[in-house]
Image: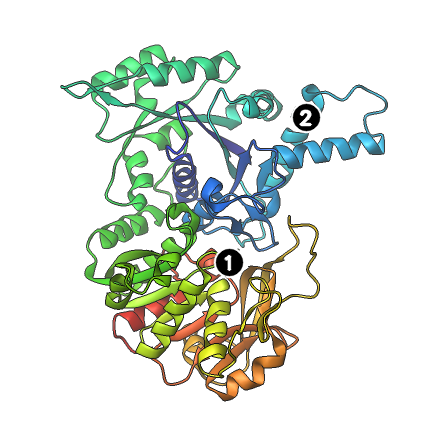
């Protein structure tokens, strides 16, 4: 097993996740079976209870794990299906150590960070890196490990020490340390400054880890003088200093690193397969897409686009498939509650409307108004999770005439509960208690648009994350009025997909199809939205 450890310095948000994912692509291009691990040093057990404003989206895995959004990067780039244990947190490690202490596993010893916590981290990495994640069923041959945060964070200390020890456990020749840093440009002449990188590498080396490769983020390519200076002060060869400058699209990042010789530093042959040739074609295609198609994204976390990262990627993947340039018109749902707000102009001029998932009652009435506009004006519409629920509420209010219809999440005393709390869900514990992970949806009709988009399959497996569902007692009335639940769970009671009769594309899904979208295989509900928005027949 070969391990590539990706750490970061200077500041967060430099693109460690894209770097780690790109290295995964390069390892796959060498013919290696790959997996990935993300280490998040926070004390939370997982990302499930964290605010999207603070942490970005929560990425849901097949086994129901609620993980960091970087696992989505790994899955999309490397075509993997990862597990909850591929996301390691301080909370998970300490829980494991304390549970072992309670069982008496340490035989009366004083439990300490070294060796017990650091051993637990190393054991976890070795255990999860041996589990197949690429669908082959065969043990991976390479594992990319991304350490969240920046070197110097107090929270990261046990993990850095564990990784220092890990290189000797598995053999230094089997570990490559890649450090991502920032090279800012200062002064009137635009001088590239190396001091921030020098300091972070010095700190990393002081902790016992010598980076083998430096990946330096910068707006423009690194100058040769900058490379040589970094090499001299960071105890590394100039050929191992990579320039990660701005590129036209993220699919060029693996190609950028390859062209600078990172494959030699990793000791691999990146031309062993045709993977990178396909990436070159995809990157070229993304740079030369056709006319624009505008999608109005009506959400409540629009101030931080990372909150909808997988939704954005899924829309992009669908736009690549139909050769159109995607333009997302961001609309804060609350603004639509004011009928004279400028966001109404953006909504009405859009080619399609998307209402993504979310929690809480803020902006709900605005989302309902957006669904109403899409239904009445016959504008292509896709509702995801909460989007399906608010469209159902809108239909109950304005088509069935159930005045005051609502979700019990927003109005516990609603006279017409269109959406209700799922009976098996805990009302006292928030973490990990939703309906989570990959579950089957079975089509109830012989033919419909969404089924055709899924290539006529009789059932589909998609990932879920919700506590509320459409009220089963109202389903027959809703369907009689023209909103048909064409997909249900295996009990045929829980509604998963609706489709509106006599509409170009008015679809809602209770699951989150964005988590399984891939650049070369777009998610069917998103593809349908883009096709309809572009005026193409489904």
Which of these two is toward me, 160 or 344? 344
Image height check: is 43 above or below 505? above
Q: In the figure, is residue 7 to the left or right of 183?
A: right
Which of these two is toward me, 96 or 358? 358
Q: Please tell me which residue is depicted at 49% across the width and 32% down the height of the picture.
A: 148
Determine crowd level at label 1: few under 14, some 14-19, many 20+ residues with C-alpha closer than 10 A.
few
Which of these two is toward me, 245 or 413? 413
Tell me how far mark 1 sits from mark 2, CA to CA: 41 Å
Q: Which mark is residue 381?
A: none
Query: Which residue lies under the disc numbered 1?
Result: 361
> In this view of the protein, can residue 470 be seen by the observer?
yes
Q: Which quadrant of the rendered structure holds the C terminus? A: bottom left
Q: Please tell me which residue is depicted at 39% across the width and 14% down the height of the picture.
A: 199
Mark toward the start of the polypeptide (1 vs 2)? 2
Q: Position of residue 508 (x, y in %)?
A: 46, 71
Query: Which residue lies under the disc numbered 2?
Result: 117
Quadrant hosting residue 469: bottom right
Q: Please tell me which residue is depicted at 31% across the width and 39% down the height of the picture.
A: 253
Q: Position of residue 465 (x, y in %)?
A: 56, 58
Q: Position of residue 473 (x, y in %)?
A: 63, 80
């Amino acid at each position: 097993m070969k391990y590539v450890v990706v750490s970061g310095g200077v500041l967060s948000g430099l693109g460690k996740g894209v770097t780690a994912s790109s290295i995964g692509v390069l390892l796959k291009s060498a013919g290696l079976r790959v997996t990935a691990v993300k280490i998040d040093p926070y004390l939370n057990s997982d990302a499930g209870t964290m605010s999207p404003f603070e942490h970005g989206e929560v990425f849901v895995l097949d086994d129901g794990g609620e993980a960091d959004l970087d696992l989505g990067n790994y899955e999309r780039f490397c075509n993997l299906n990862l597990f909850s244990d591929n996301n390691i947190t301080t909370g998970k490690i300490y829980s494991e150590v304390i549970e072992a202490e309670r069982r008496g596993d340490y035989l009366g010893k004083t439990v300490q960070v070294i060796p017990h916590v650091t051993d637990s981290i190393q054991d976890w990495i070795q255990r999860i890196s041996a589990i197949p994640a690429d669908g082959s069923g065969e043990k991976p041959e390479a594992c990319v490990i991304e350490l969240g945060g920046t070197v110097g964070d107090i929270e990261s200390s046990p993990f850095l020490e564990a990784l220092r020890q890990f290189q000797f456990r598995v053999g230094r020749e089997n570990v490559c340390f890649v450090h991502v840093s920032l090279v800012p440009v200062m002064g009137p002449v635009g001088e590239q400054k190396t001091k921030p990188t020098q300091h972070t590498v010095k700190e990393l080396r002081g902790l016992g880890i010598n980076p083998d490769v430096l990946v330096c983020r910068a707006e423009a390519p690194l100058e040769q003088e900058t490379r040589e200076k970094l090499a001299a002060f960071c105890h590394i060869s100039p050929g191992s200093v990579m320039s990660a400058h701005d590129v036209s699209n993220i699919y060029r990042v693996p190609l950028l690193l390859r062209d600078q010789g990172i494959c030699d530093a990793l000791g691999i042959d990146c031309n062993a397969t045709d993977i990178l040739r396909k990436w070159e074609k995809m990157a070229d295609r993304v740079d030369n897409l056709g006319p624009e198609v505008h999608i109005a994204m009506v959400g409540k976390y629009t101030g931080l686009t990372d909150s909808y990262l997988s939704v954005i990627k899924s829309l992009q993947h669908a736009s690549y498939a139909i050769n159109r340039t995607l333009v997302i018109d961001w609309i804060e749902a609350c603004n639509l509650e004011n009928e004279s707000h400028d966001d109404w102009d953006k909504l009405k001029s859009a080619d399609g409307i998307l209402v993504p998932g979310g929690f809480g009652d803020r902006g709900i009435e605005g989302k309902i108004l957006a669904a109403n506009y899409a239904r009445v004006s016959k504008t292509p519409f896709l509702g995801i999770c909460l989007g399906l629920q608010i469209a159902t509420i809108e239909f109950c209010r304005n088509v069935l005439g159930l005045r005051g219809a609502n979700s019990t999440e927003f109005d516990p005393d609603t006279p017409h509960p269109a959406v209700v709390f799922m009976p098996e869900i805990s009302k006292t514990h928030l973490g990990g208690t939703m309906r989570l992970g990959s579950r089957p949806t079975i089509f109830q009709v012989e033919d419909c648009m969404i089924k055709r988009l899924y290539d006529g399959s009789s059932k589909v497996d998609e990932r879920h994350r919700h506590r509320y569902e459409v009220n089963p007692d109202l389903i027959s009335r809703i369907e009689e009025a023209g909103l048909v639940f064409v997909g249900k769970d295996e009990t045929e009671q829980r509604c998963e997909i609706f489709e509106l009769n006599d509409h170009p594309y008015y679809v809602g899904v209770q699951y989150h199809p964005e988590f399984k979208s891939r650049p070369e295989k777009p998610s069917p509900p998103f593809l349908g939205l883009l096709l309809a928005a572009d005026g193409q027949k489904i």
